[in-house]
Amino acid sequence: MAGLAATAGLYVGYRKQRNDEGNTLREQDRVFTERFGAAASLLEGGTAAARLAGIQSFVRLADDSPRDSFSCLSMVCSYLRLPIKLVPQKHDRRPYHVRVSDITTWEDASEWDVRRNALKLLLDRLSEQHDYEPLEYANLPQWDLREAVVIEPNFARRMFDCSIDFSEAVLIGPISFDRTTLGGRFNFQGCVFEADFDLSGVHFPNLYAPAFESCLFLQHAAYDRINSWGLMPTFSGSAFNGGAAFLWNLDLAFGYDDRIVGSTVELHLTECTFLGDVVLPGRAVDVRGSDFSDTSNVSLLPYENHSVTLPLLRTDSTTKWPAGFDLF
């Protein structure tokens, strides 16, 4: 009988503990639901201060509830995807010409600060790295910023182990990928880059390279010091309105391998349009169908790494060079 009583006591204690845990979880869910609803209401506020408070509330809620972190941070991404009225553009060239003064003219100037802070809070969740400290992986499995208006993005010295979709987004402010590791699939197709763009120093540790097809680069674009498995980003169909410098300095991360020779290590610049000064490597670039006729100067750099054989510059009758340009 004493054994049965002890067993019954243990069972009653176990049930009470389970009930207490269940009550605690229900209370946590209730509080989370209330805070989530309050944050959503703030995002619908008519003032910039209210909207920013809503974004900050979602970020704090993500920090307090790791189980719901993705849902909360996705709400911030959703806000950045909301349309914002920019000055209508007139264009006569593919993709199109845009003046920087136009694209940074806002119907509601305070929205600039809201979106800039929203993006900063998101990147802070990814733990910004500093010199000589280990890189930490991003904690978002899927970052959806399609058609977003992104203010002053700072990707430098960060490691992303997630997939990020920026397709058709407008990115305002200088962009640097210095010592950035892109471990997932990155899609920048159809983006507008309002300020200087520098992809130099980026690292692609996996068999994924970001896509920059059909983009518009309003200012200078630079590309150098690439650490890669061998796959190169694609820029096909893009317009470079502020000049571009594609310097060949490829560091194959895991050693050179004959399996990645050929089109995988080519820089794809097919069907692009260029203005300003353009610098290209003399090898492993495909410029078929591109238009350099309006550039002020085109320079081809000699390729001097004789230890690695790369394909020649690809061009044909559809490539338009400046008047008097001597390809060879």
Image (tube, helix red, strand yellow):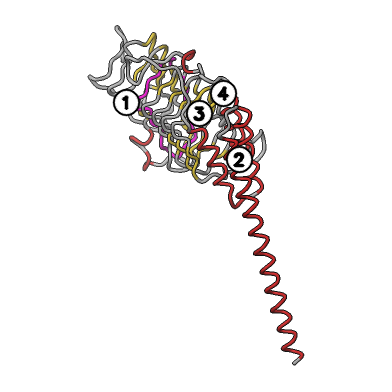
Q: Tell me the tag on residue 112.
A: 4
Q: Amino acid at mark 4?
A: Trp
Specify the segment rendered in magenta: 221-243
Q: Amino acid at mark 1?
A: Thr
Q: Tell me the tag on residue 225.
A: 3
What element does badge 1 sit on?
Answer: loop
- Say if residue 194 shows up in the picture: yes
Instruction: Please give the name of the residue rendered at 41% of the width and 11% of the height, measured from the top-left corner.
Output: 276
C-alpha separation, residue under disc 2 versus residue under disc 1: 46 Å
Q: Residues within 10 Å of mark 2 (few under 14, many from 20)?
A: many
**Answer yes or no: do the residues labelled 1 and 4 have beta carbons within 8 Å?**
no
Asked if residue 235 is among those painted magenta in the image, a careful observer would answer yes
What element does badge 4 sit on?
Answer: helix
Predominant secondary structure, magenta span: loop
Q: Looking at the image, is mark 3 or mark 1 nearer the viewer?
A: 1
Residue toward you, 40 or 328: 40
**Chain-order first, disc 4 or disc 3:** 4
**Chain-order first, disc 3 or disc 1:** 3
Q: Looking at the image, is mark 4 or mark 2 nearer the viewer?
A: 2
Instruction: Please give the name of the residue rendered at 65% of the width and 64% of the height, measured from the top-left corner.
Output: 22
Q: Tell me the tag on residue 39.
A: 2
C-alpha separation, residue under disc 4 versus residue under disc 2: 20 Å
Q: Tell me the tag on residue 270.
A: 1
**Chain-order first, disc 2 or disc 1:** 2
Q: Amino acid at mark 3?
A: Arg
C-alpha separation, residue under disc 1 versus residue under disc 4: 35 Å
C-alpha separation, residue under disc 3 versus residue under disc 1: 21 Å
**Chain-order first, disc 4 or disc 2:** 2
* Residue projecting furthest to the right: 2
**Chain-order first, disc 1 or disc 4:** 4
